[in-house]
Image: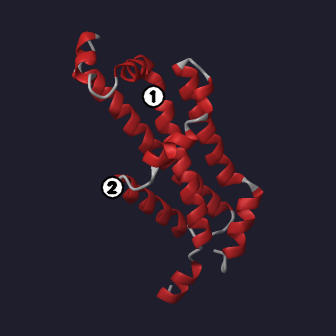
Amino acid sequence: MTLHNFIARLNWRQVAIHFIATWFFMYSFQTLAVLHNTNLVDLLRQTGKDNVTKALSENKISAPDWIYFTMWRDFANITGLLIAFIISLTISFKRKWFWFNSILVIVFVYTLNWFDLLGWTYLKKLFLTPGEMFNNTTLEFLTNGLFLLALGLLTFFLAKTNRFIAIGNKTNV
């Protein structure tokens, strides 16, 4: 395969749509991972930024508890990335789209995530709003996580988005 043929087979519409779907998957899994320790989340919400260390020691939350909490959240983020990659690759094979588009998505998302450039800091206020109608932390994070997961699934599987991608697909393989 020549370089010109390789570049001609890239579908930037697929890369963009699957990038968005992968983003939703990553942050849905991260949000759902918080459910394993909602007591810690409640404690952090009640104390504020200045008294975190004092509140953690007063409530007998050890350093390993904190590490496990952050580790679960980060591991879930990567798990969402890998599951979205598998879905993207499966869709590419099923629709006979160029598989390298899915590779590009995982590389782009992973690299931007590594440097914290995916915009979650700014967009989480918008996407974590649906769960705010509940006073229960578990229901709040469950609602938010499932909402993000639904958006990711819709982005991957909606006929309209797949038609949009297919229009930009110049060659089938």
Of residues 106 and 98, which is closer to you in this image? 106
Q: Is residue 165 visible?
A: yes
Residue at (51, 47) in percent of width and height = 123
Q: Residues within 10 Å of mark 1 (few under 14, many from 20)?
A: many
**Percent position (x, y) of residue 4?**
51, 89
Residue at (44, 38) in percent of width and height = 76
Of residues 77 and 132, which is closer to you in this image? 132
Which residue is under mark 2?
115
**Percent position (x, y) of residue 165?**
68, 68
Q: Is residue 119 above or below residue 105?
A: above
**Percent position (x, y) of residue 35?**
48, 24
Q: Residues within 10 Å of mark 2 (few under 14, many from 20)?
A: few
Q: Is residue 5 above or below residue 154?
A: below
Of residues 61 and 92, which is closer to you in this image? 61
Q: Real-space Cα distance between discs 2 and 1?
A: 22 Å
| Type of the residue with mark 1 | Val
Residue at (36, 52) in percent of width and height = 116
Question: What kind of element bears circle 1?
Answer: helix
**Percent position (x, y) of residue 7?**
52, 82
Q: Is residue 106 above or below residue 32?
A: below
Of residues 171 and 104, which is closer to you in this image? 104
Which residue is under mark 1?
34
Question: What kind of element bears circle 2?
Answer: loop
| Type of the residue with mark 2 | Phe
Q: Quadrant of the C terminus?
A: bottom right
Residue at (34, 20) in percent of width and height = 47
Between discs 2 and 1, the one toward the N terminus: 1
- Give yes or no for contact between labels 2 and 1 (Cβ–Cβ under 8 Å): no
Numbered label attached to residue 102: none
Q: Quadrant of residue 78?
A: top left
